[in-house]
Image (tube, rainbow, N blue to C red):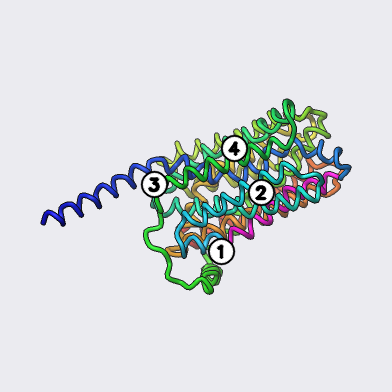
Amino acid sequence: MVFQQKRNDNINNSNENSKRNLKGAVPLLALLTAFPALSTDMILPAIPSLAKTWNQPLSVMNLTLVCFFVTYGFFLLFYGPVSDRFGRRRPLLFGLAVYIVASLLCAFASSASMLIGLRILQAAGAAASSSISMAMTKDIFSGQERERILAYIAVIMALAPMLGPVLGGWVLANFSWPWIFFIQAVMGLIGMIRVLHFPETLPQVSDTPLSRVMHTYGRLLLNPSYIVMVLVMSTSLFPLYSFIAGSSDIYINGFGMTEQKYSYFFAFNAMALMVGSFACLRLTGSISSRHLITVGFVGIFLGGIFLLLTGQHGPWSFALPMFLITFSLGLSRPPSNNLVLEQVDRDTGSASSLLIFSYFTLGAVGMWFISLEWADKIPVLGAIALGCGALVLGAWVVLQRKGIGGVA
């Protein structure tokens, strides 16, 4: 009896320790989810000057963004099912280690091609963060609580695209571009230390053999409600990624701004993501998720119209419609992410990976498209927002009418 009592006390103490550790889940999950934004946005102010230094066109330098996103997306497909098979911590620690090493190597790049190659390695490591952090969210939280936590995370992680270009601009003004990657390496180290002190969140690992672990994607592709939701939600993000790749050219070369002033305008746009996510957090209890998503899609559509009508008149005439588009994405993304995850009851890691893979793959296409030698990128960006807004809004209305995936 005494032995049994001690055993129960040890179990209770272990559970209490886990609960105590899980109290820091939201900041950790926000940091892990913010990796792609920090890894891309910090380098944005340096792209025009690097293009001149290495005598390369902007379309080539933007490959540091496009290749990062493509590689990031494909490696998401690897980390998700592996985390279902072996738990969340081990693949996450591996990815963070690769990210740290690659970031340090990027700082010593001496040509555009070398930087592009090392950014591919950096993306291969960073991919562990987004897919596994979203899977951890479903491990720890459920239902409306998870939707609220996703909104909290979205508010916190919106600081990354706000601070990223500002920090990058400050580094360029006071030091040099390699320090951007030194800072990213430190960020990866902080994430690794935090993960080392965080408990495993997956209650039971999959017993699927590693040789068949990728077969989980076959099951997901045969889940029509999940696939339809993924495609709709991914398309809604297309204008934002197009803006990320085209913003430095628009503000620095188009409107004649300095790199640091550009970073403030970019931060203003990123603030819209945080404001939208915060609005979602405040409104979740009183307005249904379905209505929040609808309002968000309408906002993207209207922002595209305003961009086409007024975007070329000056920096603020461009920034304000983009603010509306990004705010709308911040408002709709937490409930839409939760709705997508509600379509699966197993293979959560793989489902999270495929979802974010779709985000980044379409995002890479948007980055490539806006990087083409357009005479003026602003009307192109307006047409993208208008077209994507109309497409996702129409698809969303059809989904609600047909009640697909529990949308009614």
Q: Tell whether label 4 touches label 1 (CB within 8 Å).
A: no
Residue at image mark 1: 227
Residue at image mark 4: 160
Q: Is the magenta stretch mostly helix, strand or loop?
A: helix
How far is disc 1 from disc 3 in space, using C-alphas? 24 Å
Q: What residue type is labelled 3?
A: Glu
Q: Nearer the viewer, mark 2 or mark 3?
A: 2
* Numbered mark located on residue 27 in the image: none
Whether 24 is drawn above or below 72: the answer is above
Q: Tell whether label 3 touches label 1 (CB within 8 Å).
A: no
How far is disc 4 from disc 2 in space, using C-alphas? 20 Å
How far is disc 1 from disc 4 in space, using C-alphas? 29 Å
* Numbered mark located on residue 145 in the image: 3
Q: Characterize the local packing of mark 1: few (<14), some (14-19) or many (20 or more) Cα atoms within 10 angstroms.
A: some
Image location (x, y in percent) of residue 123: 65, 52
Q: Characterize the local packing of mark 4: few (<14), some (14-19) or many (20 or more) Cα atoms within 10 angstroms.
A: many
> What residue appears at the point 68 percent right and 34 percent down from the top-left corner?
165
Image location (x, y in percent) of residue 78: 58, 62
Whether residue 118 is visible to the viewer of this picture, yes or no, is yes
Residue at image mark 2: 102
Image location (x, y in percent) of residue 303: 67, 40
Which span of residues is magenta-colored? 57-77
